[in-house]
Structures are given as C-alpha cells and as structure tokens.
C-alpha cells in the first residue's frame, strides 16, 4: 500500500491533476442523447462511460473477481455532479450519536483519526469534517491516484470548532481491510460503497471495524426502491431489472444494508439505520438525466429484451426531465455501527 501524506487545502470543482504528463481529465459530457447504453454502466446508476474516459474506483485485484469482470468505475465528473444531492440526502440525525461516541473515545495524539474508504473525490470529508469538533486527521483510501488527488486538494481545512483538519492518502484495496490497517482509527466512513461489495467483503469490513474498536458511518447504500412522478407502467419492471443488475456476480446491491446490520450486530455493535433518499426535481436536470441513463442502461444490460420498450421509455423520461415535469426519489439508507471500543468488556 503506497502512502502519501499531505495537508490539503480546499479547492473549487475538480482540480487539475498532480503531475505534468499524467492522463488528461475526461472531457465534459456532451448534451443528452436519447439512447439506452448497452454496457459500461456505473454501479449505483451513474452515467455511462464514453470513449476515452478514465475508469476509476477499483475494489479488487485481477484474479480475485478482478479487473476483467468487475463493475466499471466511477468517473470524477459523476462524483462531482452527485455531491450536492448526496449532501442533502445523508441522514444528519446520525451525527449526534456519532459525536457522543467519539467524545468518549481516547484521542490518540490529541485528535480524531478518520478512515474514508473508497473516498472518491472526498465528498464525505467535505460533508462530515465540518460537523465534528476537534482536530481531525483523515486517511483517504482509494485505488485511483487521480481521485485521491482530487480528494486531498478539496479537503476541508477546519472542524466545526475551528480545529485543524489534515489529510493523507492511501492507495490500496479497500475490500481487504484488516484491523491492523485500521489501527488507531477513531472512525470509518464510506459513501455508496456497501452495495458494490460481496457478502464476504461486508463481513470483512465489519470484522475490521470491530477489531479496531471504532464506529462506522456508511452512507448512501441503494435500497432497491425508486419513485418517479408522473408514474409510468414500465417503472416497476425497470426497477426490478436494475436491482438484479446490482446483485450480479455476487454483489449485495439492495441487500447490502441488511447484510451489514447483521454483520456488525454479530460482532457486538449497536446499529442504527436511517433513510437517505435523493429527491430530484426541476432544479436537478443534469443529475436526473445522467441518473436516468445509468438506471435504464443497467436494466437493459441485465435484461436485453427490455431494450425496445426501454428506449422509448428513456426518451419520454428525458423529455419530461428537460421540461421540468419529472420528479424522482431514489431511496438509500445510511448505517451507523457503534462498535465496542477496543479493550472494552464484551
């Protein structure tokens, strides 16, 4: 695992890459086209890949359910596009019980140590760090140095009480965490991660957090339910096919939160779950349109027989979105697992 320590300053939007000669960031997306993408759909209903785009966020090594058969990875433009919806959706009521637990944990070196798994461009840190008191050191984990650079540069600089926030990046496989990797951790966080893990990987994550004695705040896991207004008769069939796509190759998809609750509870953690839905309307046309393409595209990839009907469906939905007539609720769940502190009596 390669470690790079840095104290980051917040920047605006997606920053430049760290080195001359590195790969060029993906070009801005073209205007909407009415097509159903046949392949390359990003897990969690992200936008489809276009030729020349970098792939990001890899969970497994080749040969371990590896690169050849793993889901496409997240593009930084998609992560930036969804950040405001994610921030509005996260269950803020879980922060108070988290604060209480963190206040009772020993502060090694005087501050909190937060491990953000699959950090992407760092949206969790930007949302959570300013809601927690005290000095914080965030350890950002991802497979892609391109995303790690974004996350470090755009990291918040101050906690809720003005204390300093610092950050380091670790490039590595978040699906293979051990308690040793989390030694000294005060908190583990992740966004939109659980549903792209297998049952074994969720068990390993729960074991690592329990072994380290630190709480885990795991947000924005898909719940398998979508509501669109106005209703269309094909909504339910697309939803069912999308959910099947989320469960492909042994991934948990909409079953992830239930599995994670069981895994953490079995290790003595107190678990709380709260809803964290996206509520998209006329003010979110770009995000809604990108989500629609990914959502319908994943359904068609799973069930190619839907293609003809889904193409007409997508065209109508995109037209309604452009006209400001479409509203979408995409249901997610946030999970807070309060593991017993290391050394506590069972």
Image: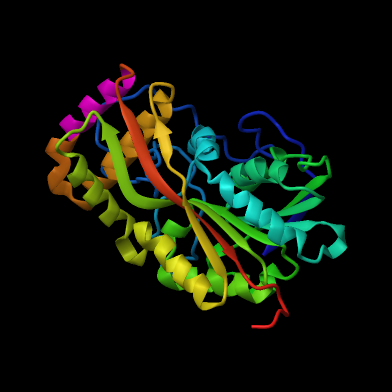
Q: Where residue 63 appears, x then y in whole percent?
A: 44, 70
Q: Is the magenta stretch mostly helix, strand or loop?
A: helix
Q: Where residue 230 appears, x then y in whole percent?
A: 23, 28
Instruction: Indicate the quadrant containing the C terminus: top left, top right, bottom left or bottom right.
Output: bottom right
Q: Which residue is drawn at 83% across and 45% down?
A: 164
Q: Residue at x 42, y 48 (%)?
A: 332
Q: Where residue 311 appears, x then y in whole percent?
A: 18, 33
Say which of 338 and 237 sits in front.
338
Say which of 300 and 69 sits in front.
300
Instruction: Indicate the quadrant containing the N terminus: top left, top right, bottom left or bottom right.
Output: bottom right
Is residue 314 inside the magenta stretch?
yes
Q: Residue at x 17, y 48 (%)?
A: 304
Say which of 38 and 159 sits in front.
159
Is residue 228 inside the magenta stretch?
no
As drawn, 50 above or below 333 = above
Q: Seen in the image, is 107 located left or right of residue 298?
A: right
- Span colored in magenta: 311-322
Residue 146, quarter of picture: top right
Is residue 186 visible from the viewing direction of this image?
Answer: yes
Q: Seen in the image, is 4 located left or right of residue 256?
A: right
Q: Seen in the image, is 105 located left or right of residue 60?
A: right
List the single residue furthest toward the top: 323
Q: Where residue 199 appears, x then y in whole percent?
A: 41, 70
């Amino acid at each position: 695992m390669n470690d790079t320590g840095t104290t980051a300053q917040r920047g605006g939007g997606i920053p430049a890459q760290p080195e001359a000669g590195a790969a060029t960031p993906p070009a801005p997306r073209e205007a909407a086209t009415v097509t159903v993408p046949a392949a390359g759909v990003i897990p969690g209903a992200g936008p489809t890949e276009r030729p020349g785009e970098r792939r990001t966020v890899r969970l497994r090594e080749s040969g371990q359910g590896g690169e050849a058969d793993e889901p496409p990875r997240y593009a930084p433009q998609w992560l930036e596009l969804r950040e405001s919806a994610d921030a509005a959706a996260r269950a803020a009521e879980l922060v108070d019980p988290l604060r209480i637990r963190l206040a009772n944990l020993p502060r090694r070196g005087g501050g909190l140590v937060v491990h953000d798994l699959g950090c992407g461009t760092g949206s969790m840190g930007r949302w959570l760090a300013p809601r927690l008191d005290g000095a914080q050191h965030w350890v950002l984990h991802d497979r892609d140095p391109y995303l790690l650079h974004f996350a470090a540069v755009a990291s918040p600089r101050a906690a809720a009480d003005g204390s300093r926030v610092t950050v380091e990046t670790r490039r590595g496989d978040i699906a293979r965490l051990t308690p040793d990797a989390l030694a000294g951790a005060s908190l583990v966080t992740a966004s939109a991660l659980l549903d792209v893990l297998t049952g074994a990987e969720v068990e390993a994550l729960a074991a690592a957090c329990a072994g380290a004695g630190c709480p885990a705040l795991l947000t924005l896991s898909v719940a398998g339910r979508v509501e669109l207004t106005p209703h269309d008769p094909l909504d339910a069939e697309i939803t069912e096919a999308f959910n099947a796509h989320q469960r492909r190759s042994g991934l948990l998809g909409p079953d992830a939160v239930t599995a994670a609750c069981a895994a953490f509870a079995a290790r003595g953690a107190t678990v709380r779950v709260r809803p964290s839905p996206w509520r998209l309307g006329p003010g979110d046309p770009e995000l809604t349109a990108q989500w629609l393409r990914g959502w319908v595209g994943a359904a068609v990839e799973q069930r190619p027989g839907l293609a003809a009907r889904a193409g007409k469906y997508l065209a109508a939905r995109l037209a309604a979105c452009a006209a400001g007539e479409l509203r979408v609720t995409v249901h997610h769940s946030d999970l807070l697992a309060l593991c017993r502190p290391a050394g506590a009596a069972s």
